[in-house]
Every structure is written in C-alpha cells, then in structure tokens.
Image: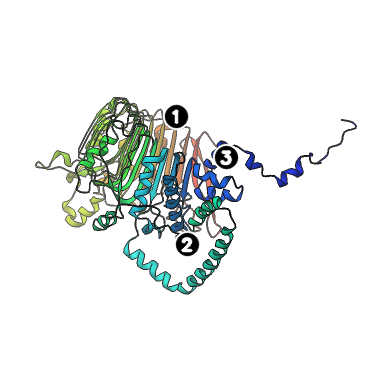
Amino acid sequence: MHGTTATTAAPAFFPAVANDDMISNLQDDLLLRILALLPSFTDVARTSAVSKRWRHLWRDAVALRFHVGRQPEDCTEADADGARRLIAAASDAIARRAAGDGPDVQDVELRFVYSCAEDEDDSYSEGPHYHANDITAAHVSAWLLFAARRVTRRFSLTLPPMMEEEEEEEEEEEEEEEEEEEEEEEEEEEVMVEDEDEDTVEHEDDDHEEEGMVIGAEEEEETSVVGDDDADEVAEENNVPFIAELPLSSKIEEMSLTLGKAILRVPPAGAGAFSALTDILLSQVLLNNGDDDDDTRLGHVLSSSCSPRLRRAQLTHIAGLSVLRIAAAATLDELRLLDLKDLHTLDMDTPGLHALSVRQCYGITAANISAPQLWEVEFVHNAKRVQIDGAASVRRVTLPMWSHLPRRRENDDQDSNNNLSAIWLLRHCTGVDRLVVKLWLPWWWSHMKEVHGDEVDEADTEDMMMAIPHMPNITNLTIQVNAHGHNIGASVAKLLSKCTEIKYLSIDVYASVNEECLDPSCICSQPKEHWDSQKLSLEHLRSVEVIDFLLLDSQIRLVQLLLASASSSLERMVVAMDMSHLEDGEEADFDIPCYGGHWVPRVWECSELGFIRPTEYEWLQGMQRGGQ
C-alpha cells in the first residue's frame, strides 16, 4: 500500500447532519416499530423531545407498557408518588386511545406490582405497595373494557393487594414525622409546574395536546375513565379491593390478569368468544361471590367451544373455585393449578395435554383426568381419589409422600390414607423414567410421644415405604427430604431399594435442627436391625448429588451405603454441606471413606471474618494423584 495515507476527514455531507433531523425522514411504520421496542410508555412519551413527528406517533403506537419497576430498597413517599403518577398516566393514555380513532393496540402491559431482581414473578411478598389503594374500580373497569375492545394480541394487568389498615396507620405516622419536608417539596413542585405551564404556551396548538399527555403523567386524572358507580361499595362490603369482569375478546391471544385479591366475575361466553386466545393466566382473585355459575363459566372459558386455540392455562391463588370442569381442545398443552384452596373436584377432558401441575390444592377430594398424551405430572397434593386415563404415557412425575402414617383402625375411612394418590400414580404410571419425591418424615410423631408417652410405639404407625411398588424404569430420581427432626437414612434407603435401574440420583435434605434422633423406639430407627447392613442394587448408578448435607451419623451412613453399593459404576458424587449450623471460623470435619475413589474439595467459601473453608466435596473414581 505504497503512496496511500489513512485519513479521518469527514465526508462532504457530514456537516449537514448536525443541523438536519434525520429521524423525521423515516417512515411512520418504521418509527412505530421502534416505539414498540421501548420497555415502558414513559420512554415512548420522552421521544417527543427527539423529534416533532414523534409527538404524534404515540397515538398510533402498537404497544403500551406501564411498569413501576423494581422494588425500591427503602420505599419512600417519593417512590409511592411516582407509582401514583404512573397509575394516572396509564389511565390517561388508555382513555385517550379509547376515545381516539387510531388503530387498535397489539400489546398492553399494566404492571403496578414491584418486580424483584432475582425473580420477576415472585413480587407479591416484597415490600409495601403504598400506591395499591389508589387503584380504583373505575381504573380497572376502564382498562379491562379497553382490552376487550381495542387490544389485538397481548394484554397483561398486574395489581398489588390493598394495604391493610395497620400498614396504612404506619404510613400515616411516617407522613406526620416528615410533614415539614413534604411541604417544602410541594412548594418547589408548584414552582416547577408554573415554569412548565409557561413553556407549554409556546407550543403550537396541535402539539399542546401531546405535551398535556406528558404532563398528565405527573398529575392524577380523576375524570379520565368512568366505572361502575356501585363497584367500590360492593367491594368494600366484601372486604376486597374491587370487582372486575373478565374481558371477552375474540382478538386477544395472550391474557394475564393478576388482580390483587379482587372479585372476578366471569360473564357468559358464547362459542368462539376467545377464538384467538392461546395463553391465559388468572391469579390473585376471588371467584364465585354468591354465584355458583362462575365455576361453570370459568371451565367453559378454558374449553374448546370457547377457546379453540388455547395452549397454556394457569390458575393461581384463586379463592372460591370449588369445581373445575374442562373439555379442552386438542391444542391445550399445559395446565398449571396453584393454591386453589377451595377446589374439591377436578374433572378434565384434555386430549392433547402434555404437562399437568397441581400444587397447594389441599381440598381436592376427586380428580378425574382424561389425557392420553400426558407426559409430565406434578401432583403435589394427596387427593383421596385420582383417576388418570393416559397414565401409561407419563414419563415424568413429581409427588409428595409420607414415610409413615398413623395406623388406620377398623372404623377409619380408607380415604384417610394421605398417600393414596401418590401410590396410585406410582402403580399406574408404569412408563415413568424421571421421578421427584417430596418425602416427608412425620412431624406428628414427637407430638404423639409428648401426649401419650411410652404408650405410643411403632405398632401405632404404618411404614408407607413398604407400599411403594417396584419401579424398574426409573433412571433419574430426585428425593427432597423434610426430616422434621428424624434420621433420614432408613426411609431413603427403603425408597432407593424400589428403584434398581437409576443412573442419576439427587438427595436434597431439609433439616430444621442439626441433631440426631436418639430415641431408640422412634419410627425413623425401624427396623431395629441396621438398615445399611446390606448393599442396595444400584449397579447402574453413575452420578449422585447430595444437597444440604449434615455431618450426622445417619446421613454419613447413607453416603457410605451409596458408595458401597455403586462404587463399580459410580463416576462422581457431589456432597454440598449445610454450613448454617457451623460457627464462623469452624470447619466441617468431612471424613468419609473413599471406597476405591477419592474426595476433593470442590467449592470454597470465605466467611465474614475471612476464614476460608470448603463447602462442597466431590468423589471421583480412582486414586488421587500422588497416591492420596
């Protein structure tokens, strides 16, 4: 490259760029696509400062998103005021779009619940939502009506629960202590508003409306929506924040309603009322407020006649739903039910269902499920009667199980056995290869001993591990043990003896106390002969993980039993210790025989005092280098 010289001189057209609004040369369709990518409506409103043409585009924006953001570290009155302004801005923007003749909106997201950095979905338990009581029935009614009429793809509304009276009193006390500071801030805000008013006069009339929209985000609009005049009174009588009605829409594809424990009315829906709906989430609502038809109507919404394209449905934290009957289309692939505390009957005809999760639905007495293509079942509750047509197709199961139960008397109801549904699933889901067992050792044993003393013995209980069938197809087994003060070794070993083909094993221990059970008559010590005296049939076991391991005799013996039974096939074992019971500076005395392999520290931690200690050990085949 002889005779050439690199240069940084700007091309001839560069000076013109500084004085020309290049954004104004873009087409509206392209600008609207850019607006749709912005995370919140506040960002859309701010684009008015970029170009005059952007000021009018918000009317035609295909997405409206209002999000209060993450939970503040210290929720101050300023944070609450910001959330209140967001509520007013959302109400104002929705009202303007509803009254205008612009196009429908594809996506609307209204989220007034703080999100957490760790888990965006687990926000209800985080901090106070001082703005919750500023959301009225009129607000919600207008938003849901807009969804029914003007939203074409996705609608999401997430509301916080109303604050209790005690929380409100605490807030009032804080406000009184900071009254003087607030008055000064109000005076400053008044001066700022006056300055803003003077600036807005300079704008043209056609721009003034959009500027008013931006200012509206700073002030509450009490007349922007009109709701049911009696809704607030009815809600107050029922001790709920408000009454909402499920929006009927043949255009919405995805609907998510989390309504802060409000009453949800389900209106009658004709055939194809939700013809476009593919995903629905209903959460934090009270159903069936004196109207038994709401159960039937909700089941109808989830059925093929009403929602022929529905793929995923989630019902969580819903009160008042006692009976759920679904005759779904073959498109329904996933159904998740969580904390439906009043549900007692579940009746499903779901020909295309692949995944079913039922958790914290403790009132279920009967579950009749027709799902010939069912692949995964999570049934974390022991219903009295479970019938699954299609159980043989299931490959993954998650279920709870008690290691022991009080022995039934002659006049006891057979349904009092809390392991009935778990045993039914294990016996009929014969094709399962991945199993998760939430194993609970009996918390009630110590209570019985305290009340009845030596009169209580092992004859008063049943060892439920004996009822578990042989499961030769299980290759991946996870056992989550809640010890409740017992030794876990014997019960876990009995469960392992039923699974002779496992390749991957995970044992997660939850023990509230770092102590051995020393009662020789306790059920966790039965049978009295050593449970670890004979090897288990684990010739195919390749990998083991033990989580929250405690250096207790029964847990050490369990690890030794696993090593002795599978040392020829085992490739690795990871033991992660529970260090919460150790003092800062105290190191765990990890001294477990190697059985033809070797232990090496895998993870270390540095304590607050600077003490470094291992928290995880890994067992590997063969001798360690150097003969150790």
For the residues marked 3 and 1, what is the alpha-carbon distance in whole angstroms? 62 Å
Badge nearest the viewer, 2 or 3: 3
Task: Mark 1: give few (<14), some (14-19) or many (20+) Cα within 10 Å.
Answer: some
Identify the residue under disc 2.
Answer: 74
User: As shown in the figure, which amino acid type bears the numbered disc 3?
Assistant: Leu
Q: Residue furthest right?
A: 3
Looking at the image, which is closer to me, 557 or 174? 174
Q: Are marks 1 and 2 in contact (CB under 8 Å)?
A: no
Badge nearest the viewer, 3 or 1: 3
Q: Which mark is residue 395?
A: none
Whole-percent x, y for residue 420 in the image: 22, 37
Is residue 533 among what the camera can see? no
Task: Mark 2: give few (<14), some (14-19) or many (20+) Cα within 10 Å.
Answer: few
Task: Mark 3: give few (<14), some (14-19) or many (20+) Cα within 10 Å.
Answer: some
User: As shown in the figure, which amino acid type bears the numbered disc 1?
Assistant: Ser
Q: Which mark is residue 569?
A: 1
Looking at the image, which is closer to me, 468 or 366? 366
Whole-percent x, y for residue 76 in the image: 46, 63
User: As shown in the figure, which amino acid type bears the numbered disc 2?
Assistant: Asp
For the residues marked 2 and 3, what is the alpha-carbon distance in whole angstroms? 38 Å
Badge nearest the viewer, 1 or 2: 2
Q: Could you say which quadrant of the image residue 416 lies in?
A: top left
Looking at the image, which is closer to me, 93 or 181? 93
Identify the residue under disc 3.
Answer: 31
Counting residues from the start of the chain, the first of labels 3 and 1 encountered is: 3
Q: Residue furthest left?
A: 411
Q: Quadrant of the N terminus?
A: top right
